[in-house]
Every structure is written in C-alpha cells, then in structure tokens.
Amino acid sequence: MGHVVAFFAASDPSQLLPAREQMAFTLGFHIILVPFGVAFTAMMMIANYRAIRHDDDDALRLAQRWSKVAAVLFAVGAVSGTVLSFEMGLLWPRFMGRFGSAYGIPFVVEGIFFFLEAIFIAIYIYGWKRLRPWPHFWTGLPVVLAGIGGTLSVVAANAWMNLPGGFTLRNGRVTNVKPFEVFFNRAFWYEAIHMLLAAYIVAGFLTASVYAVAMQRGRRDRYHRVGFLIPFAVAAVVMPGEIIVGDFMGRAVFKYETAKFAAMELVTRTGRHVPETIGGILVNGKVKYGIRVPGLASFLAGHSTGTKITGLDAFAPADRAPASIVHIAFDVMVLTAFALLGLALWFAVVWWRRRAVPEGRWFLRAASVAGVVSVVTLEAGWTVTEVGRQPWIAHGLMRTRDAVTTAGNIWLLTGVTFVVYAAVGTAAVVVIRGMTRRWRRVDGERFDVPYGPDVGETLEEAVPEIAPSP
C-alpha cells in the first residue's frame, strides 16, 4: 500500500491530509442521514395513507411514530449538513473563490428546499390531533418533495465537480455562468437517479431491519409485520431499478470519466478484450490477488469484448486516483448490491406464493443485517465517486491540493468536528432509543388516536368520516 501513501503525501501541502480526512468523515456521516430525509418520510406517508384509506390503526401508529423519528434525524441532518456547507469555504477557499459563482448555484436551490422541508415537517408533526385526516396527510407530501429536491440539488453540485460545465473560463476567471447548465450538467441525471434510488434502498432496508430484529425476538404481532412490510417492500421494489441504473452509470463513467473508470476496473494498460478483475490490488503497478474474467470489463463497458478501455498507463502518475482504494470500494458496492437484490427476490417469491410477510428464521436473519449492508453499499459508492475523481476537486480544472486552505490548524478543527458529530449522533441515538422503549411499554394498551380528541378511541370511532361505508 506504499503507493497509496505516496499518492497522498508527495509534494502535497501539509493541510491537505487533515482537510481530506475531515471532509471524508463529515460526508460519510451526513450521507447516512440523507435517505431518512428523502425516503423515510415517503414511507411515513405510505403508512399514513394506508391508515386513512383502510382504517388501519397499526399503520397510523407507525406513521405517527415515524414522524417523530424523522424529526430527530432531520435535526441531526441539519447540523451535519450545515457543517459540510461551511467546510467548503473553510477547507477549500481557493476552489470556492474561483468557481463559487457556478458551483454555489445548486446550494442556493438546496437551501430553498431545506427551509420548505423544515416548515412542512413542523406543520405535519404539529398537525397530529389538530387537523382532520386528509388535510393533515397533504401537509406531509411537501416534506417528501422538498427532501427529494434538496438531495438532487446536492447531487447536482457533486456531479458538477465530476463533469464541470455551464460557464466560460477566461484568464482563470469564471464568466458567462449559465445556471441551468450548471445544475443539469452532463453527470446530473445518472448520478441523481442513482442516489435517489439508493436513498429508498437504504432507508427501506435499514428501517425494516429494526422490525426484523424485533420479529426474531418474538414480537410478531400485526404492528411489527406492517412495520417491516412497508419499508422492506419499498426497498425490494426499487432494488432492481438501482442495478439497471448502476449499469448505465458505469458506461457513462467509461465514456466521460476515463481515469475513474480505469481505477474502478483496475485496468493498468489500454487495450481491448479487457478482463473484469474481481478483488485484487495494485502492487508496483501490477494487479495482484485478483480473479480475472476474460473480456468481461470490455463487454460491460460497450456490450462487446472488443471495446477499447483506456488504462491507467494513459495518464500521468500525478493524474491517477489511488486505484486500489477505488477498485476495492467498487467491488464492495457491486457485491453488496447484488446480495441485497437476492434478498429482494427472495422476498418477492415468498410474497407471490403466500401473500404474507416471510417469517422464516434465515430470512429474518438476512433482513436484520440488510440495513447495515445497504449503508456499506452507500458508503462504498460515494468512495468510488469522490476518491475516483482525485486528484481533481473540479475535474480537469483544479487539483485538490491547489484548492486547500493554507491557514489555521486543520487537525485541531478536525478533532473539534469529530467531537461535535459524536455528541450529536449520540444524542440522536439516546433520544430515539428512549422513544422506542416508551412505545414498547404502551404497545399493549389502547391506542391514543392522533386524529381524535379522546384517549382510548379506535380510529373509526374518532374519525367517523374515514370509516368504511355500510
């Protein structure tokens, strides 16, 4: 791994390593929260819709409780996301100074969506027991839409870093900025769809895993089955689409980001009939310890084993990403994604045959770890995207080492940031665990109906207008 250390150390400013570490930590932390702002709220709305439409007390209880969890995670995401925004200016001032007029556009849009999401999630939570069912339901939909819009805005900024566009660079200055082209850059659509689907997969499997663990411990009442079914079904439905989009995205990277693709596939020499390398790392410029499938990399890139792939040898050493890291992350992402696809198909077969939630021991064990596996997939994917772009912060325009700050003690700032994130994350876990313990204690009692004025009423008694017609 000496070449990896050399990549990050050779002729780099002393501030670069701590700046990279801080950015990687904060982004890795925040990216786990994104699916809850985008997809978890959508699952909350599915439960809310089912409750009203089908007079389902269990679904209504889930919707109300999930809304409280969403509020806690939104607060944590607001803190971590704000820190990330400040980091761009604090850690990479030269980048923001030169390209901020273009790169900042998606963040302006994201800010608008963030405030809309904050407003409507407050209205939605405050509306329990204060609004009638359907008006309350409609106040929740903007939460979902704003979460999607905010996420797509941030992805647009990242996509711009991979394939910059929408401006003219004259004498080192950005001019003639075209906001629409900046936002909807060449990498936007495949990155945006890929991330959006990933959000539903992570939120779905991670939420379902909580109920899978509870079901293994004997809590197999209808409340826990519905709590498992809604998020797991969403993730299972989305999973095949994510594989398809991932394949399309891989070919787009092959076409537009050739150096990144060479690192992903660990292609050392330009050529045709390039094998797919499973596992393995680079040792002294040669692939070691990997399993090679003849011609498969070329076939996946261009649907022909004769497809020519540009290798790492086509780029100067200073222009290459740390290929071993990128390749291992890529392999982890693909392996875990197909494992989740297999679990989704398992669920689909059992549901098709029995029209019931699978409750076998091995299925529930697999479902229990699927949440963690989906997070690993997400983190591995972002590692491919971010590390694979190196050594560029804006591909082809500015190197990361030329963008980093030269002021202050970055290691001290990194330590403070770690402490803040650890405190916020711990507080969120403590609050959510406290809520779940309290909910568990009252699960055997009659339901305090959110839409009704009296404790102990059923949903039908509290809201006669949603009761089924005689």
Image (tube, grey):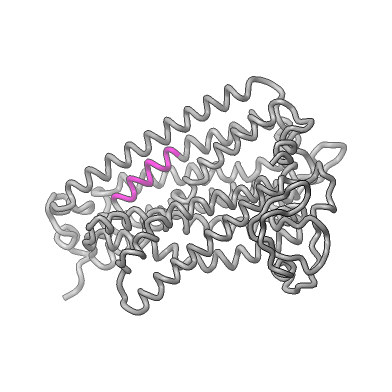
Q: Is residue 462 left or right of residue 159?
A: left
Image coordinates of residue 48 in percent, x first then y, are 32, 59
Residue at 60% x, 49% y is 382
Q: Nearer the viewer, residue 251 or 314?
A: 314
Q: Residue furthest top?
A: 408
Q: Where residue 262 sits: x, y (%)?
A: 75, 56
> Residue 131 in the image: x percent, y percent?
27, 51
For the record, the magenta segment spans 65-76
Q: Nearer the viewer, residue 241 or 412?
A: 412
Magenta part, dominant SS = helix
> Furthest residue to the right?
171
Q: At 54% from the left edge and 33% from the top edge, which residue is drawn?
A: 83
- Asked if residue 179 can be seen in this view, the reply is no
Position of the N terminus, as image quadrant, is top right
Q: Which residue lies most toward the front here? A: 289
Quadrant holding the C terminus: bottom left
The reply to whether the magenta stretch includes residue 163 is no
* Coordinates of residue 230 in the picture (x, y in percent): 35, 62
Judge by depth and name the residue closer to the eye, 8 or 55. Answer: 8
Q: Residue at x 73, y 46 (%)?
A: 321
Q: Is residue 67 magenta?
A: yes
Residue 309 position (above or below residue 23): below
Residue 283 seen in the current view: yes
Left or right, 363 with reference to 286:
left
Q: Residue at x 71, y 39 (%)?
A: 2
- State which quadrant residue 249 falls in: bottom right
Does 38 sit left or right of 330 as displayed? Answer: left
